Image: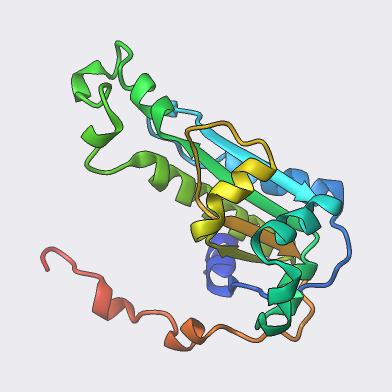
Amino acid sequence: MPSEADRLLAARRMCRDFLPDPLHDDDVDALVAAALGAPAAGNTWALDLLVLDGPEVARYWDTTLPAADRPSFPWPGLLLAPLLVVPYVDADAYVDRYAQADKAHTGLGGRAEDWTVPYWWVDGGAAVMAVLLAAEGRGLGALFFGQFDHEPAVAAAFGVPAGRRALGTLAVGRPAGTDRPSRSARRGRPDPRDRVHRARW
């Protein structure tokens, strides 16, 4: 019998069209708790969340999407999302954690470049997925999108400390019900038979 987790994973889709209604505090608290409950290598708690609502949402969009560019923006309903969450990771915190006595044997406590798999990105991605699933579980829509070349401007606008890196931005709100999927959505989800290799490739 499918579990609730199975249902959430199957139902989850990115949403780009929101109602402007503010979210309840308990919804916001649940999303934040979901992110902070995600796994972290070595219990390195180096995830910070910049949580924006009210006028700060408009400030974010003024920073990343000037008014002159908005008439051609293909998803105007995205700009109505009442909540934006920007997850930030700190690579130096992982290096410092793995320099401690119980992790020093890994050899990862010297430089971030020594990590063949940068786990700050892995753990940050897990936190993002936790928020997406928590939003789905509460009947909310959510979208994760990249900041790309706007990352420095967002950091400056909101006082983000040096050395922190944004994974992207999560927009969350109540779906408007008129969402237009991106072109990428047409690709669908993979057939497990094409991606799962049992026993050997």
Question: Which residue ends up furthest to the left in the rendered image?
Answer: 200
Toward the viewer: 58 or 91?
A: 58
At x 25% / y 70%, what residue is drawn? Answer: 196
Question: Which residue ends up furthest to the top in the rendered image?
Answer: 101
Q: Is residue 85 above or below residue 9?
A: above
At x 32% / y 42%, what residue is drawn? Answer: 118
Residue 77, given in percent of the width and then of the height, sits at 75, 76
Residue 186, given in percent of the width and then of the height, sits at 48, 89
In the image, taking residue 200 as reference, residue 154 lies left or right, namely right
Could one spot residue 107 in this view of the protein? yes
Task: Report the number of numbered marks.
Answer: 0
Q: Which quarter of the picture shows residue 80?
A: bottom right
Toward the viewer: 171 or 59?
A: 59
Residue 55, given in percent of the width and then of the height, sits at 85, 52
Q: According to the image, what is the colour scheme of the structure?
A: rainbow
Q: Is residue 144 above or below residue 42?
A: below
Residue 151, given in percent of the width and then of the height, sits at 54, 51
Q: Is residue 69 above or below residue 103?
A: below
In what quadrant of the picture does the C terminus appear? Answer: bottom left
Q: Which quarter of the picture shows residue 134?
A: bottom right
At x 74% / y 60%, what residue is drawn? Answer: 62
In the image, taking residue 46 as reference, residue 140 lies left or right, namely right
Could one spot residue 17 in this view of the protein? no
In the image, taking residue 89 as reference, residue 133 lies left or right, namely right
